[in-house]
Amino acid sequence: MSWNVELSSKVYKSLEKMPNRTKDSFQALLDEMRLAGPVRGNWPNYGKLSKDCHHCHLQKRGKPVYVAVWKVIDKKIKIIEVNYVGTHEGANYDLLR
C-alpha cells in the first residue's frame, strides 16, 4: 500500500516561486515518499528533526539551498504532510516539529 502525501497551502504558494529544477527535485521526492514512505536517507542532508518529522535538501549544492520538511501524520493509514518547502534560511524548524 502506498503512502498518501498531502501538501500544506503554504507549500503550494512556495512552489510558485521556486526554480523549475527545484520543483522537479521536489516532485521526485514526493514520488519516492508515496512509494517508499517518509524515511528518505538517499536524499542530500536527510535527517529526522523529531520522532515523526523529517527534512532534506532538494539539491546537492547551489545557493540558495532549498529544503523540504514533512511530518508523518498517521502511520497506520500512511499519511505524510509536507509542511515546508523553500530556502534553508526561511525554514523555522521549531514550528514544524
Image (cartoon, grey):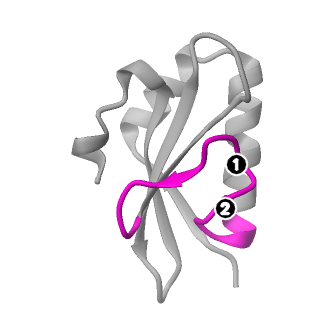
Q: Residue at x 57, y 12 (%)?
A: 64
User: Where 85 sits versus 16, above or below?
Assistant: below
Contact (Cβ within 8 Å) of mark 1 with mark 2: yes
Neighbours of disc 2 within 10 Å: few (<14), some (14-19), many (20+): some
Toward the viewer: 84 or 55? Answer: 55
The x, y position of residue 95, in whole percent, is 22, 43
**In this image, 38 relative to 95: left or right?**
right
User: Where 66 sits versus 82, above or below?
Assistant: above
| SS of the residue under disc 2 | helix
The numbered dot on residue 33 is 2
The numbered dot on residue 56 is none
The x, y position of residue 45, in whole percent, is 61, 42
In which quadrant is the N terminus drawn?
A: bottom right
Number of numbered discs: 2
**In this image, 31 relative to 54: left or right?**
right
Neighbours of disc 1 within 10 Å: few (<14), some (14-19), many (20+): some
Residue tagged 1:
29
In which quadrant is the C terminus drawn?
A: bottom left
The x, y position of residue 9, in whole percent, is 38, 39
Does the stretch in magenta take in 37?
yes
- What predominant SS class does the magenta segment belong to? loop
Residue situated furthest left in the rendering? 95
| SS of the residue under disc 1 | helix
Q: Where are the magenta residues, as a range?
A: 33-52
**Amino acid type of disc 1?**
Leu
Q: Residue at x 60, y 18 (%)?
A: 18
Q: Residue at x 76, y 32 (%)?
A: 24
Q: Residue at x 37, y 34 (%)?
A: 10
The x, y position of residue 12, in whole percent, is 48, 33
Does the stretch in magenta take in 5?
no
User: In whole angstroms, how far apart are the C-alphas of marks 1 and 2?
Assistant: 6 Å
